Image (cartoon, rainbow, N blue to C red):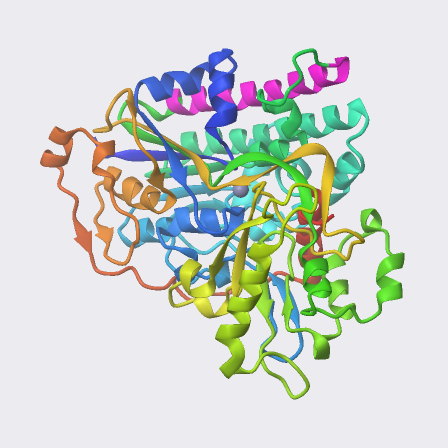
Amino acid sequence: MKPRAVLIGLDGATFSILDPLMEEGVMPSLSLLIASGARSELASVIPPLTPPAWTSLMTGRSPGNHGIFDFLRFDLRTGKPQLRVLDSDDVACETIWAMLSRQGLTATVLNFPMTFPARGISGNVVPGWVPWRHLRLACYPRTLYDCLSKALPGFNPRELAMDMAVEERALEGCHREEDYENLIQLHIRRERQWFHALQYLMREEPADLTAVLFDGVDKLQHFAWRFLDRAIFPASPSALETRVRGWCLDYFREIDRFIGEIVAGSGPDASIFIASDHGFGPTVEVFYLNQWLHEHGYLAWANAANVEQKHPETLGMGTMARRFYEIDWSKTTAYCPTPSGNGIFICPPTADGGVPAERYENFRQELADALLRFTDPATGQPVVTRIWTREQAFSGSQGDSAPDLTLMLRDGGLVSILPSEVLLKPRDHAAGAHRPNGVFVAAGRGIRRAASLSSLSILDVAPSILYSLGLPIPEDLEGRVPKVLFEPEHLRAHPVTFAAASGAHAPAEELPEMDPRMEAEVMGQLRALGYME
Ligand SMILES: [Zn+2]
């Protein structure tokens, strides 16, 4: 029997949420799968953010090599600051689906980030993070969209893909009970759309590797963390809290149903992998990094009066682009351009400013030291707990476009890039923020049963899938096949083999490009997710 593999991605899934849900009986299929296989925490990349982390999972390479550090790429080197949304063209390494295609195997790939524009593989791709109006052209092969829209009863691209109109409206406050209900129901319907597409393709065009990403887990955890986290959920909840938690559990029950049906539909010979790109935890405060840079003489706002007048809650799409006009670049030496990557860029030398090359090392060290010395005035505790330099976090062929410094905050949250009257502000309610440890579950051919393993790396997922499919591991992959995951007899009967480096991905043929409107919609999606205050 030819080995097959299934990868179920659960964006942002964390055992601190999943374990209590399994104990409560909300996720019986996941419990069963874990009992029949192995589980472990999955160490994400730096920063533990959706685009770099999934790209590492898909390529087996670290961000310094695949070149994806954030949702957006910031470039100051041209003299004029530029910020653009990254796409599959920016991924500098071969993906696992391309490795399969190269060796005559097929893949179905649904809803993964950084897969737009979809590149030709043997199989089917519906990319994630695509505004619904662009979905038809975004799919590979080109006929796939029409095929799905005809075959799937209730097919609705507005629910399957991104629809800013719906999500912005649903998120406008999330103060009222019905806002939460509408938003959670939307995510349940969205996952059903992906699940139906998956079921259809598994039936009609079964592939060697079937991969689907359910990304509502991340979204629910961002906006409904305080209802999900047992550790902070009140012992005597209000009616609202009880109801919102109930809807959240409905969502996870539905995900569990998908897991059960996917496992049943894959047959006994398939290897099943579940993985998340990062974990999750609470964030309780906001650190205004650019304001800190301003107050410490690194950043100059171009028009302070204008900045102060702005009401952060009304800033919408293009927020980040507009911020550029509010920076006086001639007087700015360090800047955080995005609210998602916790990264600081040091301005390169120009005719009228920037940091000269000979001062760079000292400048960077002084800046990092000053940030690490910054303490919460209320408690005297440090706010920035760790800082990586570009070389530490992003060594590799693509490291040049990475931030000069990447920060970890004491509450695991993301910095704010906005001006502010205070440097540190408590949040009204705990929100969800990413954590380094995601989840990994595997079951099937040769995989140990009832095994709880110490943490694996997200870089190990691609080699593990390749191994399960009987393929050699390209030498340039940075992860490994974790021997502890497999039965010793299986490893003896099927030794891990290696092949020459996979190299870069194939150059693009005629692919649709991200136009400015699509870029604006993706920016809007970031705002909807809470990345833009
Ligand atoms: Zn994520």
Residue extending farthest front = 380
**Residue under the image location 63 percent in, 84 percent down:** 350
Q: Where is 289 relative to 132, above or below?
A: below
Residue occupying image coordinates x 31% and y 33%: 454
Q: Position of residue 177 (x, y in %)?
A: 79, 22
Please name the predominant secondary structure of the magenta segment in the image.
helix
Instruction: Please give left or right for residue 33 compared with residue 48 in the image.
Output: left
Question: Relative to 193, is 402 on the left or the right?
Answer: left
In the foreground, 49 or 308: 308
Q: Position of residue 263 (x, y in %)?
A: 38, 23
Q: Is residue 14 visible?
A: yes
Coordinates of residue 231 in the picture (x, y in percent): 58, 22
Residue 246 within the magenta-colored segment of the rendering: yes
Q: Residue furthest bottom?
A: 351
Residue 2 drawn above or below residue 452: below
Examine the structure image and report whether residue 291 is included in the region drawn in magenta.
no
On screen, 462 above or below 206?
below
Task: Give the magenta-colored segment's residue range.
Answer: 238-264
How many numbered marks, from 0 up?
A: 0
At horizontal 63% and vertical 31% (from top left) the residue drawn is: 220
Residue drawn where x is 68% and y is 53% of the image? 523
Relative placement, left or right, of 165 versus 143 is right
In the depicted view, which residue is nearer to us: 141 or 175? Answer: 175
* Residue 439: % across, % down: 42, 33
